[in-house]
């Protein structure tokens, strides 16, 4: 039996205007956005005031024209040195190594970290053609050689690629006498034992800490 | 027990750049898009090539600058008269009355309708302050008075507001001798009887048609 909603199909063939079609095509390139959502956005924008639409259009193009990567930590910034690297209240000797900008935002939101960051721009993944050379590991090595860094916190995803990258960095940096740590793995705050996977639970028993 | 993922909170406080913050704020105004998705879009655009971002930005602003509403049917168009109204292959005496542009697209996609449209721009809803005067019913009345329209197909949603609007239009147009029909209500193609709501099923029995 055919179970197809005739109006809910994903292909919209005849757009009433080339402008709409063009906008739908461009909007549907955004991650996770299909033609249907793109059309919803386009019709929403069509109903919005022209100033609002201009603000969105400018904000988008400004992303490419006004944003740079901090020359020190490779985080996104409006200025050559980002506001975290240039802040006098941040501990420059404590560097948290993360995969990308989203991780910086996530850690910043915890309000628990007062060091600086180093954004790798990805993790080593031979399958996707990402070698150590395409990441900012060289620049991290230069900073470590400089001698101002006391501790590197490796805050990478707990995946094969993340672990590989962590091992690679640890091996490279060891000879310069820098302390290398990694963020704690274990059961999430609020998580229940019975729903935790065996590997996490097993590791959390092996890596148990003093109760205080 | 607190069940909150610390990284998954909806509030992102410290953006690394004003440009990013601005883009996230503007993108999160799109329907159904929150700050998290907006950030995902912003980071995606940041990684895209500048030409791609310019294309999106231009497509968005073109929506307001290049799109007009067809002066005849109020559908979206690039020209004063839309390509449906100006097509010689379309039956101008058969007019399908719909709520908005999305309905035109949905009906066009069926490839079953060869008349023209009239887009109301909404349905009568006293609660939301939408009166008959804020819709394009006046313009429809003028067309009907003109005498070229033989049949009006009311293709409105089967809601209280949709039904109210249909009754209002039918009452207004009746005296000009135009035939007024409404799209068939019933069990969707591919729908199963046992999962159909009672009202639809009841109406589909009362409004049964000849088997052919």
Image: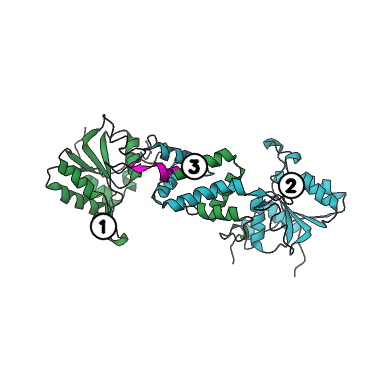
Chain colours: A cyan, B green
Q: Are marks 2 and 3 in contact (CB under 8 Å)?
A: no
> In the rendered image of this protein, does residue A42 appear above or below residue A82?
above
Q: In front of the other: label 2 or label 3?
A: 3
Q: Is residue B70 magenta?
A: yes
The chain containing the residue under callout 2 comes to A
Same chain letter for marks 2 and 1: no
Q: Main secondary structure of the magenta part?
A: loop
Residue segment shown in magenta: B62-84
Same chain letter for marks 1 and 3: yes
Q: Relative to A157, is A49 on the left or the right?
A: left
Q: Which mark is residue B80?
A: none
User: To which residue does mark 2 refer?
Assistant: A163
Q: CA distance from mark 1 to mark 3?
A: 35 Å
User: To which residue does mark 3 refer?
Assistant: B58
Q: In front of the other: label 2 or label 1?
A: 1
Q: Which mark is residue B131?
A: 1
Q: Residue at x 34, y 37 (%)?
A: B79
Q: Residue at x 20, y 53 (%)?
A: B168
Q: Relative to B27, is A152 on the left or the right?
A: right
Camera-nearest residue between B97 and B146: B146
SS at mark 1 in the image? loop
How dense is the environment of label 2, judged by Cα within 10 Å: few (below 14), some, or many (20 and up)?
Answer: some
Q: Relative to B14, is B169 on the left or the right?
A: left
> In the rendered image of this protein, does residue B161 appear above or below residue B207?
below
SS at mark 3 in the image? helix
The chain containing the residue under callout 3 comes to B
Q: Which percent across, then down, holds residue B45?
A: 57, 45
Q: How many marks?
A: 3
Q: Which percent across, then down, holds residue A105?
A: 64, 56
Q: CA distance from mark 2 to mark 1?
A: 63 Å
């Amino acid at each position: 039996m055919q179970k197809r909603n005739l109006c809910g199909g994903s292909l919209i063939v005849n757009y009433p205007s080339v402008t709409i079609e063009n906008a739908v095509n461009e909007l549907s390139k955004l991650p996770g956005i299909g033609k249907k959502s793109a059309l919803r956005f386009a019709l929403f924008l069509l109903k919005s005031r022209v100033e609002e639409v201009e603000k969105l259009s400018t904000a988008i193009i400004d992303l490419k024209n006004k944003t740079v990567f901090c020359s020190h930590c490779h985080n996104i910034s409006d200025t050559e040195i980002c506001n975290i690297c240039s802040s006098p209240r941040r501990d420059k000797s404590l560097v948290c190594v993360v995969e990308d900008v989203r991780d910086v935002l996530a850690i910043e939101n915890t309000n628990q970290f007062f060091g600086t960051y180093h954004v790798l721009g990805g993790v080593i993944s031979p399958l996707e053609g990402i070698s150590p050379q395409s990441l900012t590991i060289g620049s991290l090595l230069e900073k470590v050689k400089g001698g101002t860094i006391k501790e590197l916190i490796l805050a990478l995803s707990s995946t094969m690629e993340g672990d590989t990258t962590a091992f690679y960095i640890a091996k490279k940096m060891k000879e310069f006498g820098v302390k290398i740590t990694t963020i704690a793995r274990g059961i999430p705050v609020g998580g229940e034992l019975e729903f935790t996977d065996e590997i996490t639970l097993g590791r959390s028993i092996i890596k148990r800490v003093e109760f205080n």
